[in-house]
Amino acid sequence: MRGWVGIGAGAWAALALAGQEPFRRRVGAFAAWWALTWLMLDWHIGMLETPDGRERNLGPADACTLARVWLVPAVGDTPAPWMCALAFVSDGLDGKLARATEPTRIGRDLEALADWAFAVAALRGAVRRGWLGRNAGIGELARLGAGFGYALFVYFGSASAPDPRVLHAARAASPVRAGGLIVAGLGHRRAADTLVIGGAAWSALAIALALVRPRGSQASPAAAEPSGRLGLPSPR
């Protein structure tokens, strides 16, 4: 685990020393964020095991998830298109890699937090830069907050796992929302607003339908397959 943390710190330091922005001006924010990430991983070190209880180190799927965590301080300042595209690709890869290997319990739970943190930071950065309209940003942030609140309520209110149909309901709209962030960085604000608002509305409708559908109903294969969602709290 320390090796992964060291690689992340070294990569950021190299970019900062080379004068690359926003890495140079966000050194302090990264140091604090990466230290919190390290503490969180260390605190949950007992979860470095497979779902059936066998110990194992962080793997390729966990590396993809940590890449999004690593990018959070950068996108909170300047959500460049390449950063958002990298996050979207890694979000899809980590689920596939987890199924191809053996996922860790900590990686399964960290993915949800990584998706949420990245999406919130990228929206904040895009709105601050004027690349995304405030209403579009607020709408998507409200959706993210509602999803995170639902997961917390179920976990701590009923001490049970959230309904997977609800957690996976917005999966189909992920490319639309991610595309909105990428387009925003390319300078097409009107198109970005349309994609983000449309993706948020599509996701909200899908989640509402999942909530009202009887819990025992059969989920579609696409919804049942774990994958990346960039911001909706859900396990692999």
Image: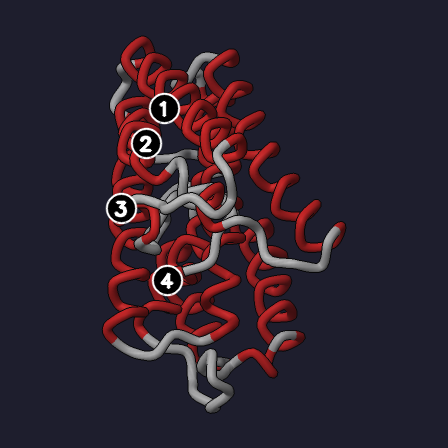
Sequence-first tag of 1 and 3: 1
Secondary structure state at the residue bearing disc 4: helix
Query: Is mark 2 in CB contact (under 8 Å) with mark 4?
Result: no
Sequence-first tag of 4 and 3: 4
How far apart marks 4 and 1 lie (CA) works out to 36 Å
Query: Is mark 2 in CB contact (under 8 Å) with mark 1?
Result: yes
Q: Nearer the viewer, residue 22 or 171?
A: 171
Secondary structure state at the residue bearing disc 1: helix
Q: Position of residue 201 (x, y in %)?
A: 42, 19
Residue lying farthest to the right in this orientation:
157
Q: Amino acid at mark 4?
A: Ala
Q: Nearer the viewer, mark 4 or mark 3?
A: 3
How far apart marks 2 and 3 lie (CA) works out to 12 Å
The answer to whether 39 is drawn above or below residue 160 in the figure is below
Q: Amino acid at mark 1?
A: Gly
Q: Position of residue 110 (x, y in %)?
A: 51, 61
Disc 2 marks which residue?
Answer: 173
Sequence-first tag of 2 and 3: 2
Q: Amino acid at mark 2?
A: Ala
How far apart marks 2 and 1 lie (CA) works out to 6 Å
Disc 1 marks which residue?
Answer: 199
Sequence-first tag of 2 and 4: 4
The structure residue drawn at horizontal position 53% and vertical position 30%, both measured from the top left corner, is 212
User: Within 10 angstroms of label 3, few (less than 14), some, or many (20 or more) residues?
Assistant: few
